[in-house]
Image (cartoon, rainbow, N blue to C red):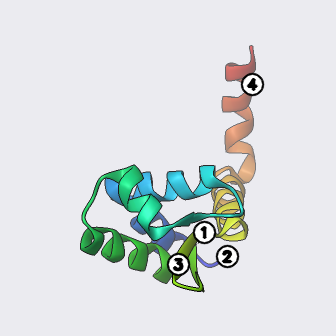
Amino acid sequence: MKIELAASQLESLGNPTRLRLYRALVRAGVDGLPVGGLQQKLNIPASTLSHHCRKLIDAGLVTQERTGTTLICRANYKAMTSLVGYLADECCADGACEERRETTEA
């Protein structure tokens, strides 16, 4: 993963509404959620939801698929795993996290 992609993904998750949206999609599992269900769950206007979905889609963290008349949003688990792995690998380089891990396990 390139640092620019990681920064873009982290930036998109830096908004509280988008983080709530992403959390809801991750928790929904691989089936995702219809846009209408997301709107009710988050209690936000359709235009606001559309804006925030677009940001997460552009960052590669969310996908959308139309099934008949229903628009389904899904978390991109591969992208999430890649981002978390990048943070662990790059930020914990040179054993920086080993010391922290030892103190939290004790």
Q: Nearer the viewer, mark 3 or mark 2?
A: 3
Specify the label residue 24 is tagged with. none
Instruction: Locate the C terminus and report the quarter of the image it occupies.
Output: top right
| Residue tagged 3 | 70
Q: Are marks 2 and 4 in contact (CB under 8 Å)?
A: no
**Amino acid at the residue labelled 3:** Thr
Report, in whole angstroms, how far the alpha carbon at label 2 lies from the one at label 4.
Answer: 27 Å
Does the rendering let one see residue 13? no
Q: Is residue 46 left or right of residue 11?
A: left
| Quadrant (top left, top right, bottom left, bottom right) of the N terminus | bottom right
Q: Is residue 8 visible?
A: yes
Label 2 – label 1 distance at C-alpha: 21 Å
Q: Rounded to the nearest whole Å, what is the CA distance between mark 1 and mark 3?
A: 13 Å
Question: Residue 70 at what x, y percent from top left?
Answer: 53, 78
Q: Few, some or many C-alpha atoms within 10 Å of disc 2 (few <14, some 14-19, many ≥20)?
A: few
Percent of width and height locating residue 48: 26, 69
Residue where numbered disc 1 is placed = 74
Q: Looking at this view, is 32 or 88 the one in front? A: 32
User: Residue 11 appears at what percent x and percent y?
Assistant: 40, 66
Q: Which residue is mark 2?
A: 1
**Distance from the alpha carbon under mark 4 to that under mark 1:** 36 Å
- Helix, strand or loop status at disc 3: strand
Q: Earlier in the sequence, mark 4 or mark 1?
A: 1
Q: From the viewer's perspective, is the residue at label 4 or at label 3 nearer? A: 3
Kind of residue sitting beneath label 2: Met
- The residue at the point 72 percent across, 57 percent down is 89
For residue 30, which quarter of the picture? bottom right
- Residue 63 screen position, x and y as percent: 58, 78
Which of the marked residues, 3 or 2, is nearer the chain's N terminus? Answer: 2
